[in-house]
Image: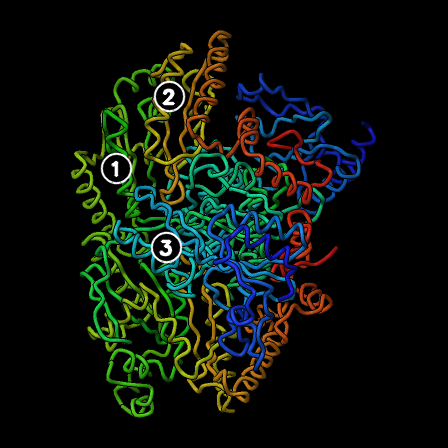
Amino acid sequence: MTLARNVYKALEDIVGPENISDDPAVLDSYRYSLAHTAIHIGPYYDTFTPRGEAVLLPGSTEEVQAIVKLCNKYKIKFKASSTFWSAQGYPSGENTIQLDMRRMDRILEIDEKNMFAVIEPGVIGATLQAEAMKLGLNTHLPGSGCSCSILAGATSYFGSGPSNLYGGWHYDNLLALEWVMPTGEILRTGSLGAGCGWFCGEGPGPSMKGVARGFLGAKGAMGVFTKCAIKLFAWPGPQTLPVEGTIPAYRVSLPDNFKAYTVAFPSWRAWADAAHMIWDAGIGYLAHRQFNMFGRDLKFAMIKILTDPTKTLGDLEELLEDPEVQKVTQESMRDFQIVLAGMTRRDMAWQEKVLDEILRRTGGWKVEAMNEPEIHDWALLYLIRLGHKNLNLVYAGGYDGCFGFLGAPDYGTTYVEEAAEFKREWEKRGAIVEAGGDCMMGPIGGQGGGGTCLWENFTCFDPHDKDSVEGTLEFFDACTELGLKRGWGVGMEKWNAAARGPDGRTPPKEERDRIHLAAPQPSVFRYQHRVKEALNPNDLGDAYYETLED
Amino acid sequence: MEEKRAQLVDIVGEAGVIDHPDVGESFSLDHELIPPLKPCFLVRPQNVDQVQKIVLWANETQTPLVPMSSGAPHFRGDTAPTAPEAVIVDLSGMRRILKINRRHRLALIEPGVTYTQLQPALQEEGLRIIMPLLPRANKSVIASLLEREPVMSPRYQWNLLEPLRSLEIVWGNGDKLWSGGGVFRGEREEEWRMGLVPLVGPGPGQLDFYKFVSAAQGSMGIVTWASVKCEVFPECRKLFLVPAEKLEDLIDFTYQLLRFRFGDELFIVNNACLAYILGTEPAEIVALKDTLPAWVVVVSITGGHIFPEERVAAQEDDIRDIAQRFGLKLMPAVPGCRGSDLLNLLLQPSSEPYWKLRYKGGSQEIFFLTTLDKTPSFVATMHTTANEQRYPVPDIGVYLQPVHQGVGCHCEFILPFDRQNRAEMDRTRELFREASFRLFRQGAFFSRPYGIWAHMVYNADAQTTMVTRKIKDIFDPNHVMNPGKLCF
């Protein structure tokens, strides 16, 4: 309890006594284990993010603004988070109060005709999707899954996911936004600032939305986003998803204008060719290399378990001995999933025909075992709803990603086997799950309409086992070393190294500077520094907004 | 002044410096409200190094720079200096198409590259770029995209800046930066094979650098190349027209097409606008206005490279069904306009004279962003105001272009006037001013605030103005880039 009483009282006056706490037990529940699923920062055994000075649950933009102004007055850092996905949503130093945005969870409007929704930070993907579907619309769900805040992904992090292809990633979908800036002033971008509604985030003139986020967002280090408008897209399905089945084998049977295929190819070149042809033709509602996250050797056995409520992980080894499972595993080595959704019957027929033609031209095939009704309907629900994120952790309770080739398909496909083989060798050492080396997953279309892919190689480990955690960290260090040697650069296993060190706290400035100076354009971080000086003069965020002094 | 001239000659050579340049006639009536100033010199850099040297020189000498990539006539006043002793930086000589790559559907172009130049080159590679409605033949592709000129095919517009991707930017402080994926410039063929190419627009990092030069009217920096995303050149395409007597009758139908992302080029025009597009001389335009339907949805259907005919046939049937549901007809021609003829026109830049000038020799534009459902009320306001200002309502061209996959709509009024007729010019100017204010008060979002619109929009949004100025101070601390524009 280090906040001065008068400060605590002032904060309490803003949000009310029921929405603030500095009880150590409560504060510790707002810390994050870096040994757990740390999303590209750890794993570091027995390390937690620093304890906040207090946690507040603001209920309105006005309350957020008042809190931020008070933070400026008393020079207290603040970190807002909506659904707390990963360590990035937590403080990385002392003298920080935490804003838990969950009370601001209203869908303020869905403009059916103009296809956008206005939401608050606490609105999760599942809620928005369910409401949108009632109106024949859908929302893109970032890879973090449907239980995460849509606003957080769109404004503050990445916003990429399986439905980038047709739905656009949330960089594209972010329209006007309301931003309590680090000084406490409120910026409303685009048409909103002009009093003309939420439909446009750009302008007038040069777009100040470009200050709010670039390729990535500021990860909670530059003020608080309190509302935003998100572009939606057509949902040519029922108003509610008719979900059936028993946990974990939930599935959905949709009309014939929906199909979820797993397609596979004889070579990586053919895989890349198919991706380009799909983008050129403009087919597909969603495309993702999804189930390979279970590993090239294990994925079909895992799908058999996950689609059969009578099976458990204990059946895995037996299933792996099944010749039929082995056959499917072999034929789906170079695969991805694609969902077709026809806006009309004719549209669906044409898309089906085009997909078949692409497979013919590339020598690819549909993995027929994935078309079994139970499996098909499970996969369809998985991909549309993205509600199975718990399965990221299914093997041992922890996972993290490494490598993460980002670029055109030719880039990832050139190196996938080398990176997979590298991991396969490390898997033999016992610290990480032996899954076949290639556990690479990511969107077929990193942005609307395609063009790029992302190859995140899932690495599963036991966060409660010191040897497993430390072995995984050793593996990640080796990945970085290989990436630098091969010219791939530092992989996603170190994406946050500039912002948080092994002790869970901001690394020393010298270390951050070293990383930023090694970037292809250090000036990017210098400009970010100047923007921080201009808009966050009291430096009340953390190092997740990456800067380099002149 | 002679010293300045000599310094510029040192940078771009004797042939690259023009004294007291005539930068072409401007058609903006705004100029009588905000008078432009005569520039001292026009310089023609040939590469990014020269551009950088010019900008650094401008910082040293406190000389205003006005970037310009397109040829005359200039319509909106953004290339007309509003500060004394300015130097025009004419980028039209940087007109190399650096790369066209079919696999990545990407082209790298310099700022002087025009649609007239780019489109045939793309077609040779089986590609095309989505175009604005009949750009001037000498219109720079990069300038058009930077100014967020709406494109005719909203379905490909994943964001408002599409199809613009990575840029090379020389900021007002003289720094060079590659935005988006521009650090992968694809200088080696190997990089193109590996997919290390400038495919990405946003970033890099946590700022969105290309948004700071977007719609900036040259006030932040100078773009020296850009990558632009292309589409497959369709092996089969058809254009249809859906007529109606009232604009309101077309709105829900258009929304349905946008919802399904049916149609490629997709927009709404009134009879006057369509007449200006189709007609070649005033008498023909008058006749066309009387013949054409009051309002028309223009929708093209394209088939790419796999089963193109079947794609077009399926979508034609679907759109016909949708039209029928709304009591409308999908037609290959309407009185005064055949779809195939219009398609041929739309696939090219405007022939000369520029289409907005054909009727009366002069034309004033009013355009802004809104949503499609609100456009009828803006049209009504425009007509009321025109009546009050004794401007002939039948002459008002209306062009409604859905943008960003239908989330927003560019609403444009075209007001032809006779430049030889002083009274008509005065009436048009007064209409322009009065209608601009009324539309603004009604909720029109002047997202690209040229001329007098800048005062309206920035005065109404203090926080945006403050942040925009802070960003300007970072990238152009000495305010050498096109001073006097926007809120600077």
Q: Is residue A65 visible?
A: yes
Residue in front for this viewpoint, B53 or A75? A75
Task: Name the side, left or right, on which A30 lies relative to A358.
Answer: right
Query: How far apart are the two marked residues, 2 and 1, measured between alpha carbons?
Result: 21 Å
In x, y percent, where is residue A228?
45, 48
Residue in front for this viewpoint, B119 or A197? A197
Residue in front for this viewpoint, B277 or A523? A523
In x, y percent, where is residue A212?
55, 50
Q: Secondary structure at mark 2?
A: helix
Task: Specify the label residue A167 is tagged with.
Answer: 3
Q: Quadrant of residue A271?
A: bottom left
In x, y percent, where is residue B235?
31, 49
Task: Specify the label residue B381 is tagged with.
Answer: 2
Please tell me which residue is depicted at 58% across the width and 34% down the height of the picture.
B462
The chain holding disc 1 is B
Q: Which image quadrant: the N terminus of chain B? A: top right
Q: Quadrant of residue A540?
A: bottom right
Q: Identify which amino acid the numbered label 3 is placed on.
A: Gly
Task: Specify the label residue A92 is tagged with.
Answer: none
B328 vs B397: above or below: below
Query: How far apart are the two marked residues, 2 and 3, measured between alpha carbons?
Result: 35 Å
Task: Specify the label residue B252 is tagged with.
Answer: 1
Q: Identify which amino acid the numbered label 2 is placed on.
A: Thr
